[in-house]
Amino acid sequence: MSIKFERFKTGLAILDEVLPNGIPRNNMIMILGEGGTGKSVFMLQLMYYRLLAGEPCIFMCLDDTPLSILQSAEGFNWNLLDYTSKGLLRFIDCYSFRMSPDKASIPEYTIYVENPRELYLLVDILNGLMDRLGMRGRGAVFIDSLTELMSLSESAVALEVVKIIRAECAKERGVTVFGTFHFGVKPYDDLEQILEYVVDGIIDLRYDPQYMQQGFLVKQFRVRKMKGAPHHTGWVSFNVDSTGIFKVSPKT
């Protein structure tokens, strides 16, 4: 059965403004930036809008626990538990193995991975979960973060796994994949450049350098790369409040 890989609007107004025709569903997209520039909020808000659209989502936790993700979303009044109960949201927990959690207390919406360093097994878990959620031509996978994924195994293995996820999730199933990457981590500079080549889209985040010289931190993003979709490439200033991300004037 063939799948028509349509484009979709993200629901995030400032991002849709620079991607007027939407994002192809069969893209893997990297959200790249240094700490504090808004990568996690971007991921959460993108996922929330997919859930609002009635599409299933998988969040692969590598930098924090599923509970922390739920709490962060609650800070924006996004009740993700509603979507776990509807069967639309599932977590793959690749973080909590460091804490030896009580397996009896793991909620049903979370798959706990005892040894996420077995990256090929992680791909099998992801594929199995997508099958159960009926993710084909709809939905999205969120990986936070690709940097941490790179740290779990040898570079060549980790890169191959990223390529497999892109091939099996995005290209074969038409399930969009979003992943954060922490800019400026020296041991992974070379891997960052390879990932930039591998992925279909890149969203850069930074602090406005001119305002930084004046002692102010103004967040900005740009769409540097997006295969199959026309896009504006200029920097857009934004802020984050209790409702999420919104566009601001550079003079604000």
Image: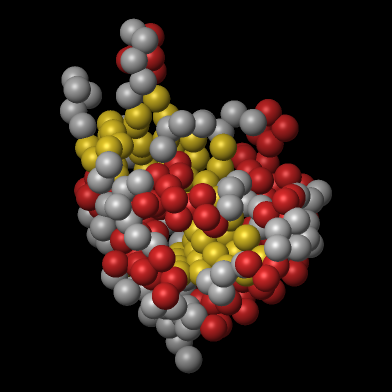
Q: Is residue 252 above or below residue 201?
A: above
Q: Quadrant of residue 38?
A: top left
Residue drawn at the location 50% of the way across and 40% of the way down: 32
| Residue 84 in the image: above or below residue 223 | below
Question: Residue 250 at x, y = what percent?
Answer: 22, 24
Q: Residue furthest top?
A: 214
In depth, the one of 103 and 219 nearer the eye is 103
Figure disc tally? 0
Q: Which residue occupies the foreground of this view, 191 or 134?
A: 134
Residue at 62 percent across and 60 percent down: it is 93
The quadrant of the rendering that contains the C terminus is top left
Q: Nearer the viewer, residue 71 or 126?
A: 71
Q: Is residue 33 above or below residue 175?
A: above
Horizontal side, residue 72 vs residue 157: left or right: left
Say if residue 165 shows up in the picture: no
Q: Residue at x 56, y 33 (%)?
A: 183
Task: Using the rendered image of the protein, determine whether residue 152 is visible from the camera's viewpoint.
Answer: yes
Which residue corresponds to the image point at 73% horizontal and 45% vertical from the top-left? Answer: 151
Q: Residue 104: image x %, image y %?
A: 67, 71
Estimate the x, y position of residue 33 in percent, counting from the top left: 49, 35
**Furthest-bottom residue in view?**
1
The quarter holding residue 234 reads top left
The one of 182 and 22 positioned closer to us in this rendering: 182
Does residue 117 appear to the left or right of 87 in the view shown?
Answer: right
What percent of the width, then of the height, locates residue 156? Answer: 78, 51
